[in-house]
Image (tube, grey):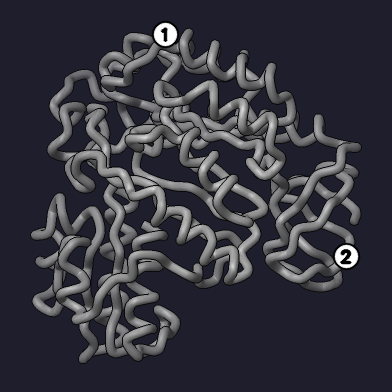
Amino acid sequence: NQYDSELIREALVKGGHEESSFNDTCDLYIINTCTVTHRSDSDARKLIRRALKTSNNARVIATGCKAVTDPASLQEISPRVEVAAPSDVSGLLGVRLPRVITHFQHRSRAFVKIQQGCDNFCTYCIVPYARGRPFSRDIDEIIQEVEQLTSSGYREVVLTGVNMGLHEHGLAFIVNQVLTGTRVERIRISSIEPWTFEGSLLRLMVDDSRVCKHLHLPLQSGSDRILESMARPYTAGYFSDLVLGIHEACPDIAIGTDIIVGFPGEDDAAFQDTLGVIQRLPLAYLHVFPYSPRPGTKAYELDHWVDEMTKKKRVGILRELSQKKRKDFAIGLTGKNMDVLITSSRSGLSSGITTNYQKIMLNAPVKPGSVVNAKITGFEEEGLVGII
C-alpha cells in the first residue's frame, strides 16, 4: 500500500497538484485502504470521516483493498465518498501513474514492488480476493526504478510484494540482478513466505554485504493442525528447520515472524505448540495479531471460535515473549560494529536502523539518509545504543 500511495502521489505532483498534510483543509483527500484486519477497516473509516469533516467541499476518494472487497461499506459512509479500485484511480483523477517512482516522500528508505497478487488463499486471508492472482513485474523495470531511487539519494531499497517468492524468476534471481545492475548500497527483503525461500537467496545474504541480514518469515501457528486448517503449505517442523539452517549460516541475521492468535479451533494444546516453537527458535522479534474474521474467507465459516478474553491473554503472553526475544538478540550484538542507515537526527544524537533491522541511537548528529559504521555499546528499552 505504501508503494501504491507513492505512485499516486508522484502522479498528482507531476500533474501540478501540491501535497499537503492530511489534517489541512484540502481540495482532494485520497485514502488508500487496507482490509487485512478489522482494525485496519476501522482506521480507514476514521480517516474518511475525518476528511469529510475537515473540508465540506473537497473530493474524498477511497481506494485500496477495501474498495475492491467491500466498496459498499465505504460508499455508505457518505454520498461524497468516491470509491475506486486501484486500477481505476488514475482515470478518476485524470492522471497517468508513472511506470517507476523516483522518490519516497518522508522516508529514508525506498520501497520497490517486484510483484503483485497471491494465489495461496490461506483460509484467514482476504488479500487474494483484493489483489488478484500473482503478476510478476518486469526485471528491467525493477532495475530502472532501483537505479532512479539510488540517483535520488536513497541508500537502501526494500523489495516488497504481496507474495514476493511467487515472482516468475524467483526472488534470489531478482536480488542478484539488482546487485549487479544498480549502485544501491543496501537491499532489504520484506516479508517472504517460508515455502518460497530459496537456498540461493541465503547464499547471497551470506556472501554480499549489500544484502541486509534480515528476514521476516511468517509462521502464523506452531500447531500442525492449525496450519493445515489455515491452508499453510508447511509444518512447524519445516519452519523450525528452515530458521535453524538460516541462523547457522548467518549467525547475526535477525529473523522475525508473524503469529495469528485465536484462529478457530486453537485450543490450549495448539497454543502451547506455538509457544514451544517460538521459545526454541533463534527469532529476533514477533508480530502478534489476534485473529480477525474476514467475511468471504473460508476461515469465516469455521466453527470453534476462540473467545476474546482468551485471545487477549494469549496475545499478551506472546508479546511478552517477543520483548524477551528482542532484548536477547540485541544484547548478543553488543561490542560488534555494524553499518547504520540514519533515519533521524536531533539534540546532538542520531537514530537509525542496522543492517539486521535493529533500531539504534548513536552519540552524534548525522544527516538522515546517510550510512555510517557504528560500534554497538549496549541496549536500552527502545533499542540499541552505539558510538560512531
Residue 291 x %, y %: 33, 33
How far apart are labels 1 and 2 at the CA level?
50 Å
Whichever of callouts 1 and 2 sits on the residue coming sooner in the sequence is: 1
Q: Find residue 79 and report its horizontal and vertical position in percent.
A: 9, 76
Is mark 1 in CB contact (under 8 Å) with mark 2?
A: no
What secondary structure is found at the residue carrying circle 1?
helix
Does 264 appear above or below 216? above
Q: Which mark is residue 87?
A: none
Q: Position of residue 147 (x, y in %)?
A: 54, 61
Residue type of the residue flagged with mark 1: Ala
Q: Which residue is mark 2?
A: 364
The image quadrant that residue 356 belongs to is: top right
**Residue at the disc numbered 1:** 269
Mark nearest the camera among 1 and 2 is 2
Residue displayed at 15% across by 54% down: 68
Residue 171 location (% of width, % of height) = 45, 35
